[in-house]
Image (cartoon, rainbow, N blue to C red):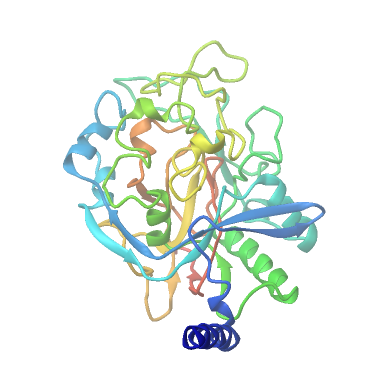
Amino acid sequence: MKKLNCLRSLSLVATLALLWICPAFADEPKQGDTKRLTLGSDVSLELVYIPPGEFMMGSTAREKQWATGIEGGAQTGTERESYEGEPRSMRVQHGFWMGRTEVTRGQFRQFVEDTGYVTDAEQPGGATQVFDHDWDRYYIGETIVHPWKSVSDKSWRDPGFGIPMRDDFPVVCVSYQDMKAFCRWLTERERIAGRLADGWEIRLPTEAEWAYACRGGSQESHYFWWGDDLMEGQGRLNISAVDFLPGRDTVWPLANAPWSDGYAFLSPVNHYGEKGRNGFGLADMCGGVWEFVLDDFDPTGGHEELHYLDKEQRSVSRPVCRGGNYFDVPGNARCAVRLGILDVAYSDSRDGFRICLGIPQKTVPVLRTQ
């Protein structure tokens, strides 16, 4: 008995010594752990911890066929689905924290008020893509007129939806450069307050981190984070659905989700509660708004490591966006969908972002010359 008590004492001493030598051992985060960042003026942002793990990047031929079929509704005859690449296993080597939701208009406004920052759309000569209220429908068989136009008098403050804006809507009409500026501000704020550990920064996620996070821990190549059945998405995502445009009695044309999500444009972040969160507890990973990631766009598919236009310069010219948006047909709101953005200064009322807290990943935005 004395020997057993002695061993227990030694075990306790060893554990205490380990905690003293390596404090991180005591605070090692686990999947689902959360932390809240304060942005000032009672505005905060919640993060969820995601451990390292494996996932499937890309999509199967069957999935691509569904996306361009009757239910998926994506336009056939384009190379868009080829950007996803074939299914291949990848691994995220380091754990990271990710915003439970997309950055909201209220959170972005706090950044602007604190810094005086002027977005690319608000700069002299700046512009952003917004909904064209003169548009009435697609004209099949003739030139297809898309309902988006570039204007110089709209921005994240007023994206031109023609509806009252809410602080809990995801912020839109912000560029890759604007998003990186928000992340730098928040990193510096946390560092000055002593709340940011050495070797960590707040930034956009890499494409691999985003793709892994979107699938919610599943290693299967499902269409959506909940599976392959679109009907199981009811009450889970903001997507082109049976919803009326403001002041009209018609719905979005072409393929729609066969239910109403209650919003012709944006829905508030985390509007769908627990049902709208994937296996990692992240909300709105499909639909809502396109989410930018750090990587430069490679049309042959996404990468496990951060992809640059020029690796030596760490340059990015065409950022990648993921996840679909409130206007898109269901086939364009899958986990595997990926597109290249026109430029690092480009912004759109369908585009937003969510933040990541992880190991530093430097990129240098470069404006396209043509």
Q: Is residue 223 above or below residue 51?
A: above
Number of disc labels: 0
Closer-to-camera residue (320/21):
21
Q: Nearer the viewer, residue 190 or 142?
A: 190
Q: Is residue 238 visible?
A: yes
For the point 62% across and 15% down, the residue is: 247
Tell me: 297 left or right of 58.
right
Residue 238 x, y percent position in the rendering: 50, 32
Residue 138: give x, y in percent of width and height. Answer: 40, 22
Q: Residue at x 48, y 68 (%)?
A: 366
Outermost residue toward the right in this view = 41
Q: Assign the C terminus to one quadrant of the image.
A: bottom left
Q: Residue furthest front?
A: 1
- Is residue 370 visible from the viewing direction of this image? no
> For this view, does 141 lie left or right of residue 96?
left
Residue 358 x, y percent position in the rendering: 52, 69
Furthest-top residue in view? 249
Residue 137 rendering spot, x and y as whole percentages: 44, 19
Q: Quadrant of residue 232?
A: top left
When asked about the image quadrant of residue 266, the answer is top right
